[in-house]
Image: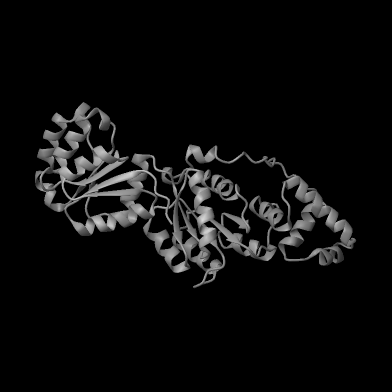
Amino acid sequence: MIHHRQPVLVVSSDPDCLTCLQGHFGHSGFRTLLARDGEEALDLARQERPAIVITDLDLPRKDGFALTLELWGDPAFAELPIVWMVGPSDDTALDVRLHGFRSRSVAGRTPVILPKPFRCGELVRIAQGLAAAPPAILVIEDDPACQEIIAARLEAGGFGCVPASTGQAGLGLARDHAVAAILLDLRLPDQDGLELLGTLRRQLPELPIIVMTAHGSEAIAVKALTSGASDYLIKPIQRGQPLAALRKVLATVPPASRMLPQEAVHAVEPEAEITPELPLSARELEVMAMVAHGLDTRSIADQLVLSERTVANHLSRVYQKLKVTNRTQALLICLQNGWVNTD
């Protein structure tokens, strides 16, 4: 289920255009309103108060120029963002009509002009920026109950949710829709999650990807991180974990379309900061380096000529310093900060 948010009004006499954009905006967290002519669009705008209007210029009854002027002439819509979809047939008279439009427009405002043909994802990104829409998060998870829980937590934190129940569906949505990040379950019905992670990372190198698994282990964490995961969550996922992980990874992504909404920043209690200085002793780092290579407590004790109890004490102090509860979480922090490696 997708949790719809701000309404976007799409106006076109082309039914194929309406159907296509309805799907893309719906998947990107908007509630889509459709109108086939200018009069219908004006009525819908007054009833539904859209966050943005996207319109063709050539429309029955009231064209896109007249629709825009009438909307901006109403104080209730004076700040409403409007995008014109401009096709080749509009080009000849566009400059002349645009000059006339500017002379009549409220405060000389002009809409965003998007030439056709364009990619639907490009239009969605424009709409997200103009309407200050919350970032959409792609959640690739085949368990419907888990999908619902994650979607509800994302919505509460100010995000939209784009669901996918298979790897193939998730890959298609990641390519075609303007998502800010991905939450990826490593166990999927149609393919291995780590393989999908590699594919996503090759095709979308800048997109943050947080992996989720119910079978956490140091080996899986290492594989995920070395395959390009931005973070790693172990199921059952606690209430604040998805938002905290997203807050962390999105804070480092520069494009405005992927930046974290302010409400999401305040939706999660701030976590205790780990000081930038190396917090672990040389022996603790040595133990964690062996954890990174898949050694268990007994093997680490044998390698370092220590008792298992001593190794367990070292690990306990690592957990305390890093404010985590298990080896996998500790290893994740060590790998992300470059304190240990798998070479």
Q: Of all residues shown, which one is farthest toward the front?
A: 47
Q: In this rendering, would 33 be left or right of 30? A: left
The quarter in which the C terminus is drawn is bottom right
| Residue at (36% x, 48% y) in the render | 30
Front position in the image: 142 or 95: 142
Residue 300: percent from left, percent from top: 82, 63
| Residue at (69% x, 42% y) in the render | 274
| Residue at (51% x, 46% y) in the render | 250
Relative height, residue 298 to residue 178 (above, below): below
Q: Is residue 343 visible?
A: no
Q: In this rendering, would 98 be left or right of 184? A: left
* Structure colour scheme: one colour
Residue 248: percent from left, percent from top: 57, 45
Front position in the image: 236 or 136: 236
Residue 11: percent from left, percent from top: 21, 48
Q: Of all residues shown, which one is farthest toward the bottom?
A: 190
Q: In this rendering, would 278 be left or right of 200? A: right
Front position in the image: 301 or 23: 23
Q: Is residue 196 visible?
A: yes
| Residue at (23% x, 56% y) in the render | 17
**In the figure, residue 293 lies in which quadrant?**
bottom right
Query: What is the count of numbered marks?
Result: 0
Q: In this rendering, would 272 be left or right of 98? A: right
Residue 16: percent from left, percent from top: 22, 59
The quarter in which the N terminus is drawn is bottom left
**In the figure, residue 268 lies in which quadrant?**
top right
